[in-house]
Amino acid sequence: MKSPFRALSSIIGQGPCVFFSALLLSAHAWAAEDLPQPFEDPSRLVVIGGSLTEIVYALGEEENLVARDSTSTFPPEAAELPDIGYMRQLSPEGVLSVSPTAILALEGSGPPETVDVLEKASVPMVIVPESFHREGILDKIRFVGAALNAQDEAEELAADVSQEIAAAQRQTENVTERKRVLFVLSMEGGRLLASGTGTAADGIIAMAGGINAVGVFPGYKQLTDEAVVEARPDVVLLMDRGGDFDTGDEELFANPALAGTPAGQNKAVVRMDGSYLLGFGPRTAGAVRDLATALYDTKTLAN
Amino acid sequence: MQMLLSRQLAGAPEGDRSALARLVLGLLLLLLAAVAGLSIATGASDASALSVVESWFLETQETALSTRDRLIIYDIRLPRIVLGILVGASLAVSGALMQGLFRNPLADPGIIGVSAGAGLGAITVIVLGGTVLGPVVALLGIYTLPLAAFAGGLITTLLLYRVATRRGQTSVATMLLAGIALAALSGALSGILIYLADDRQLRDLTFWGLGSLGGATWTKIWAAGPIILAALVTTPFLARSLDALSLGEASARHLGIPVQRMKAAAILSVAAATGAAVAVSGGIGFVGIVVPHLLRLIIGPDHRYLLPGSALLGASLLLLADAVSRTIVAPAELPIGIVTAVFGAPFFLWVLLRRRDMLDL
């Protein structure tokens, strides 16, 4: 029971609805008129969503932060702020108890009843959309910048992040043999819970020049042994949760289907921090670079 | 209080406990009032209930409340307390009714399929709300989930009742067995939906299963309150029949009890009360089992006192559990189902260990 709970809780804001992410994939940058009005009084700011918290810090607007949600654990200073709970299960009185004058929330924050009460309390709230590609990150930065009246800083940060990500992605441009990557969210009873399409894991694998080994279903699903064989992963990607909660190589390859795949034969496993890998925030360029380096021989990577 | 009552009990374990029962009912009423007072006064924020009371009597500039405090007291804590009382009372009374009707100490509303059906309704909305059921959600808004849960519970119960009723007679044994089959079917259908769910929806499902009074609003109370109250008002009329039923169905019939009508009324009350309660608060376990047994230990099995006593104690305990859930990890919140089980289960075990002989299961 413990491990899927932890596994799910460490994923920050996964794909909204498959349909919406499909829509957003084709969407371009948000027009200026779609961006929110700046908060009138951002002096007591609450941020809901780990990547938004990272952006607030990256913009240097952190002095106004009074609380954060449980997915906001980076930078470490953020983790010291009061925690108002998991972003999908916020308690109205809990949020109001920190007397917020402005709330920045990632798409999917809730439940709706809490959002209702917060609207009733007339706390200004900006909902930031999320999608799992480069433009999605830049939009998040522009949204946060507009809401905090830091448009110029946001444009600067967006340009930097865009450039870094583009550079990180260029590394794998000339790779001819794309690695098939199997992202495993958790292992329960020897069965793999793997990422399909429309998820943050799917997005980051594509950005790092890999191919999602199971691109046939949306969201996270348990794979049958035959599907594992069929997926032919070259590499298994896992979230590094630190310490004893990790799924060890031994446990992973005790699954005979997985042991028979190229990944199993070469014991090719990559572990990365969950919020770093799947956050889709300012640190994503680094995550793309790290993942690409872990996937490919440095010789095949362009600088 | 417990010790005093135990000593009184030891004096006259077999005798008439009416006087004691009436005393306990009075004490429970006081307990509920005290817990409700405590609940309105505490919470994650520093909003003061005292200043609200002050503002009723002294309309001066100093006592005028800030909008925020007023909102927290009137729109967050108060509906939550009312909902907690309604849900706690209906869960405990439903448990007592089911244990009386099935003459089985393990019976709870889950047996007649309410929980499984309500769960299926809720899961359907959580998983399909964004796609297939989109138009329904657009129409009913945030009340889609409670309505679906209520409908799911009621439909399952009615189905079960039909299956178990032959020639105007409802067999409780058939109902129990058919209930297990229907629960398995609901479980399988829920399983399909869980398989379809994405991980955000899975998180929502987990939290729904753990229960919460967090979404309490006045609108929800206006929707669920009348149903729960109607069911609770019916139950005292069933007390005499349930007492007679404890002698066996045939004996009850010879005593002139309209057994079939009584069964129908009891099952409908439980389905309505539990369905409405589960719909607004998710899955809150343990109240329906612990409360009636605790009361039986003290005041005996007489349903005239057991039913109202269960309502009062159930409401008090759930409010107390909610107070813990609201404050223990503030400003975040712990699901109340965890609190009821973490405190309820060991306490119940302790009671069982100490007073096994009294229970006579």
Image: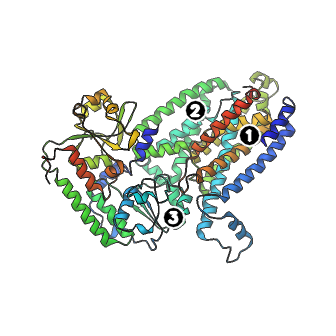
Disc 3 chain ID: A
Of labels 3 and 2, the one closer to you: 3
Classify mark 1: helix, strand or loop. helix
Q: Which residue is mark 2?
A: B159
The x and y percentages for residue A261 are 24, 31
> Does the rendering let one see residue B17?
yes
Mark 1 or mark 2, earlier in chain? 2
Amino acid type, label 3: Glu
Question: In the rendered view of the protein, which quadrant contains the N terminus of chain B?
Answer: top right
The x and y percentages for residue B77 are 63, 58
Relative to B172, is A41 on the left or the right? left
Q: Nearer the viewer, residue B216 or B323?
A: B323
Q: Which mark is residue A208?
A: none
Seen as rendered, the residue at the extreme bottom is: B61
Of labels 1 and 2, the one closer to you: 1
Relative to B123, is A254 on the left or the right? left
The x and y percentages for residue B201 are 43, 45
**Spatial distance from mark 3 to mark 1, Cα to Cα?**
40 Å
Disc 1 chain ID: B
Residue B239 sits in which quadrant?
top right
Q: Which residue is mark 3?
A: A119
Q: Nearer the viewer, residue B162 or A247?
A: A247
**Spatial distance from mark 3 to mark 2, Cα to Cα?**
41 Å
Of labels 3 and 1, the one closer to you: 3
Relative to B17, is A46 on the left or the right? left
Residue under disc 3 on the same chain as residue under disc 2:
no
Disc 2 chain ID: B
Mark 1, Cα crowd under 10 Å, few <14 / some 14-19 / many 20+, is many
**Residue at image point 58% right, 29% down:** B179
**Residue at image point 58% right, 58% down:** B44
